[in-house]
Amino acid sequence: MNPLSIPFSILDLAPIVEGGSAAQALHNAADLARHAERWGYARYWLAEHHNMPGIASAATSLAIAHVAAATSTIRVGAGGIMLPNHAPLVIAEQFGTLDALHPGRIDLGLGRAPGTDPVTAHALRRGRSGGADSFPDSVVELMSYFQPPSPEGEPTPRVRAVPGAGAQIEIWILGSSLYGAQLAGALGLPYAFASHFAPAQLMEAIDLYRRCFRPSAALARPRVMIGVHVVAAETDDEAQRLATSLEQAFVNLRSGRPAPLPPPRAGFTAQLSAEQAAMLSEVLAFSAIGSTATVGRRLAELITRTDADEVILTSQIFEHRARVRSFELIAALRGVIA
């Protein structure tokens, strides 16, 4: 089987570029999602991050509603919601509402990281107990709110999600370590690994997930999605130039200076310290950057190595037109468009 024939999806961080705005970032998200739908991408996910000057999807449920309203068939969802930041009932109501508006199209990826720095995490969780340690219980509680309403004459739960009960939400567990792999396997849920920024434990995690998977009402067999950073362009050199925006963003973030996504910068990698170069090599180990042919070979290699069932692509490119073109080139190499 051709490795590139599995479902391809998009993870959008709704990048706010240097000199741009959140409004423009969200407009661009809807525009890219419309193109992705036309080009046969399976899902369009947005991610929860807070206090990040370069990311516009902090209010993730609202961003999903915006994108879902701009499209008609592509699945739209969260990649993901950082559940320790929220009461499970609130998320059930929000995603129940999304399902009511866009039935059969809503995904809910769940993570246990804060999606931000410790000070901001404290502001988000003020007055809430549990945190990451209660993540498994919170996932089970959240899933219970999506159960169909009790038949007439049977006891009704005292707390219900309205909307939410009976919603057809596809729930995924997200992870970058072995913890999420074990939980996804135990609950019989699909598992998405964040190899686009933390690939170190990918192979061990997906092996663990497959070994401990228990079939459930949601899923009969394990389902693995891998994340890959992609930058596709007409030539390898042009793709490498565009990728310097992502590289600058990672260096800024790891230096404690998150900022809007910067424009490409010639010679950026030559100016890096040895420590910075090693960091980029590690976090971008599961990336595909280059011409269509280069990206196609790299994606086929990663999919074959992991035996992934799906792949989700993310692309931090400064110029919106170039980002759209990147995903168009990938759709073309898969034979989806001419």
Image (cartoon, helix red, strand yellow):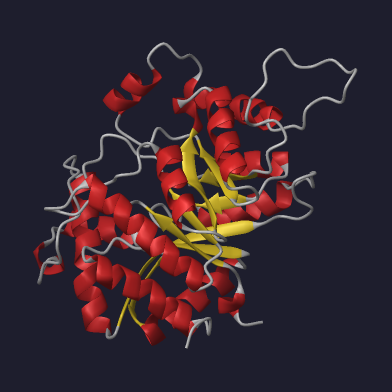
Q: Quick one: 6 or 75, which is closer to the camera?
A: 75
The answer to whether residue 314 is seen in the rendering is no
Note whether 55 is above or below 128 in the view shown. Answer: below
Q: Quick one: 313 or 130, which is closer to the camera?
A: 313
Note whether 145 is above or below 232 in the view shown. Answer: above
Note whether 140 is above or below 244 in the view shown. Answer: above
Q: Can you give x and y, in whole percent of width and height, for residue 239 in the image?
A: 26, 76
Q: Is residue 57 left or right of residue 145?
A: left
Q: Where is the N terminus found, in terms of image quarters?
A: bottom right
The answer to whether residue 266 is seen in the rendering is yes
Q: Can you give x and y, in whole percent of width and height, for residue 41 in the image?
A: 52, 67
Residue beneath the point at 56% across and 39% down? 179
Q: How many marks?
A: 0
Q: Can you give x and y, in whole percent of width and height, for residue 241 in the image?
A: 19, 73
Q: Quick one: 243 or 202, which is closer to the camera?
A: 243
Q: Is residue 150 left or right of residue 243?
A: right
Q: Quadrant of residue 316?
A: bottom left
Residue beneath the point at 78% across and 27% down? 149
Q: Quadrant of residue 115?
A: top left
Residue beneath the point at 35% across and 43% down? 57
Q: Is residue 85 left or right of residue 307?
A: left
Q: Can you give x and y, in whole percent of width and height, for residue 243 in the image?
A: 24, 68
Residue beneath the point at 41% across and 11% down? 127
